[in-house]
Amino acid sequence: MTTLSPIKTFLNYINGSWRAGSSDETLASINPANREVVGYVQSSTREDLNEAVEAAKQAQKEWRKLSGTERGNLLFKAADILEKNLDEVAESMTREMGKTLPEAKGETARGVAILRYYAGEGMRKMGDLIPASDGTALQFSKRVPLGVVGAITPWNFPVAIPIWKVAPALIYGNAVVLKPATEAAVTAAKVIECFNQAGFSKGVINLITGKGSVIGQGLAEHQDVAVITFTGSNSVGKQIGQTAAARGAKYQLEMGGKNPIIIANDADLDQAVAAVLSGGLKSTGQKCTCSSRVIVQSGVYEEFKEKLIAAVKTIKVGNGLDADTWMGPCASEDQYNTVKYYIQKGIEEGSQILIGGDSPESEELKQGFYVNPTVFDNVTTNMIIAQEEIFGPVLALMKVESIEEAIDVANDVEFGLSASIFTKDISKMLTFIDDIDAGLVRVNYETAGVELQAPFGGMKASSSHSREQGEAAKEFFTTTKTVFIKG
């Protein structure tokens, strides 16, 4: 595998070879810790996209004919190669989007696990025997691939999210064209090199980089792309979904969240504080499942707040490659400006900053896109910082009197991705599980984090209501063919 160089230009991977785009233009991937160029990627054109889709279309005809075991063996090989290169891929991730190195290594290891999970899917059933009304007939269903999958992935999980889309798409017999976010495209190229080394047939998997308005929208519009799977912002996701739906393509959207974590009067406050820090501030709050609203019953509000602030004060902000860094920078200048905008809105709306709201004073960090972990007090549900996704290290403390009020406040947003509650009372747990509007519900655990073997997706504006990961991926990346054979 090629060693990462700050000045290297990375190519598209189309039809089994690395090649430059038809445009002379390239796009820079910037290290958010110090603004250094990590690498350059292709600013591809529709012509390049057409080549990638055509390669995938032709390759899928033979790929779908392989047995699940044969396809799975290739995924196992890709997993082994990714595991061998884990340190290099993780360092690339940290340099591209700022995530701390331990987090990056953990995510890359998760990518390995996802590949192995879906490799095993090649040995599992792909249909059912169905009784026929005619006793001399045989009737059964079988799951079959859909064709070419267009995968559009974000920068915040540049290994796990592409793999959890690509791996199931491939194991079920589809071919893939992957369009990663520019901010994480170098890391994506290193992941795809693992597939290249594993020996996948030409055209089965393709990587194309470029502007979202050109390549992402182009995938949604392309008549030969049967499936679109997207993770990203609501505004872009809605546009992608509308475009795909207009031509009858199958699509899957995983979008934003404004995830609540409820702290009941009987909660273990130390456990809850640890979960809020991890779920809300790890990865600089740049997770769709991050805990951005902390809804606390009045009986423990002051004590919880005191413990939370004490814990936030211990956080070390810095370059993700430094061993003692707990939280890195925002992933880009645009994201940094977005976070600063919401902090100012919180101040203007009358909420008080208990800690943070500024950037580190260290000269070493001034070149990077750093925001100190920020906690707002006395946030009400009508405030912008309680309603809109910030995608940064900003927590909003909200005081309520009862669990019923807490659930009402939690549901009073357009999103419904993840939610959690901290309580020792089983009746409160069950009420929360039944009444919360969220696709991922947790009790006495942080809102962030996804089990790869379980379905993942949101309610309301967080999702197109299909699910990713686990066995749910089979439902999305295949369709059912019913077969009736007369004896």
Image (cartoon, rainbow, N blue to C red):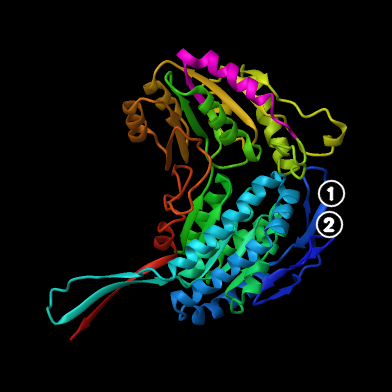
Q: Where in the figure is residue 63, as x and y percent of width and height?
A: 51, 78
Q: Which amino acid, by three-letter code, is at mark 2? A: Pro
Q: Which mark is residue 359?
A: none
Majority secondary structure of magenta residues: helix
| Residue depicted at 52% across the width and 63% down the height | 116
Q: Nearer the viewer, residue 340 or 290?
A: 290
Provide the residue span drawn in magenta: 294-317
The part of the image, by quadrant, that contains residue 343 is: top right
Task: Give the labeled residue for mark 1.
Answer: 36
Q: In the rendered structure, which disc, 1 or 2, sits on the residue that comes first in sequence? A: 2
Q: Is residue 124 shown above or below 303? A: below
Task: Give the labeled residue for mark 2.
Answer: 6
| Residue depicted at 65% across the width and 51% down the height | 105
User: Helix, strand or loop at disc 2?
Assistant: loop
Task: Give yes or no for contact between labels 1 and 2 (Cβ–Cβ under 8 Å).
Answer: yes
Looking at the image, the residue that sits furthest to the right is 363
> How many numbered discs, if any?
2
Task: Identify the image quadrant of the C terminus.
Answer: bottom left
Is residue 300 in the magenta section? yes
Q: Where in the figure is residue 85, as x and y percent of width and height?
A: 69, 62
User: Helix, strand or loop at disc 1?
Assistant: loop
Q: Nearer the viewer, residue 137 or 320?
A: 320
Task: Identify the image quadrant of the N terminus.
Answer: bottom right
Q: Where in the figure is residue 25, as x and y percent of width and height?
A: 80, 63
Residue 227 seen in the current view = no
What distance separates the C-alpha of mark 1 from that of mark 2? 8 Å
Label 1 neighbourhood size at 10 Å, few (<14), some (14-19), many (20+)?
some
Q: Which amino acid, by three-letter code, is at mark 1? A: Glu
| Residue depicted at 22% across the width and 76% down the height | 139
Label 2 neighbourhood size at 10 Å, few (<14), some (14-19), many (20+)?
some
